Amino acid sequence: MENKFHINHPEDIGIQKQKVSAEDIRAAKAKIEKKKRKPSSHCLFCKKSVDEIGGKRVVAQKTLGTYISKTYRGGGDPDFPDLSIKIDDANYIVLCGKKGIWTDELIDKVKEIYLNIECPWFCQKCAGKTCHICGEILNNPIGSDVIYDDGCVLHVAALGYNLGCMNDACENYKKWGE
């Protein structure tokens, strides 16, 4: 006898009368869960690729970022307000940043990137993650969420020590791993 069941939403799992194997449940969850978004091809502000500018792709930090939310968010810090843009019946794009930074052109670009199942990002220079001495890129953008080629987003913690910059002519230069 063939098991016929329909799982369209995560809450459908477990309410079926049929016996379902763990493998079937994993397969169903994989089909309906949120997929990782690959990073867009270039920085949202300067339009350079990560190969051109170097460093890592920043997707969020305390004062700049974009993300998808099921909850409308607006206001907050008057100098760095949140702005929500509705993209469908259940989802919003939330934009965080300095007041006035989100122009109509940038908002349209962010919407286009998210609708293409990609994730917008900022280079370390545009995100302000640069050396305080020479202005070049830091080895790691501390206090930021970064996105990798496979869509994985990880947080770079602020650990209380100087990571140094990538400019070998700077007195703040540090080469890690040697």
Image (tube, rainbow, N blue to C red):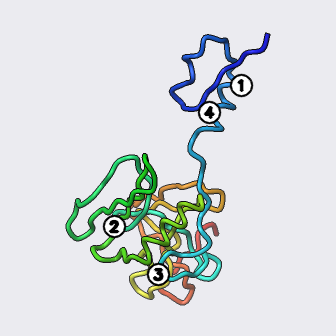
Quadrant (top left, top right, bottom left, bottom right) of the N terminus: top right
Residue indicated by mark 2: 63
Pinpoint residue 85: horizontal percent, then vertical percent: 38, 60
Pinpoint residue 54: horizontal percent, then vertical percent: 59, 78
Q: CA distance from mark 3 to mark 4?
A: 47 Å
- Mark 4: amino acid: Lys
Mark 3 and mark 1 residues within 8 Å of each other at the beta carbon: no
- Mark 2: amino acid: Thr
Residue 133's tag is none
Task: Give the mark, 2 or 1, whose residue is nearer the N terminus.
Answer: 1
Quadrant (top left, top right, bottom left, bottom right) of the C terminus: bottom right
- Mark 1: amino acid: Glu
Q: CA distance from mark 4 to mark 2?
A: 34 Å
Residue 29's tag is 4
User: How crowded is the residue under tag 2: few (<14 C-alpha within 10 Å), some, or many (20+)?
Assistant: some
For label 1, the SS is helix
Q: CA distance from mark 3 to mark 1?
A: 52 Å
Q: Which one is in front, 117 or 132?
A: 117
Task: Give the mark, 4 or 1, whose residue is nearer the N terminus.
Answer: 1
Residue at (35%, 47%) from the top-left corner?
71
For label 2, the SS is loop
Pinpoint residue 165: horizontal percent, then vertical percent: 50, 78
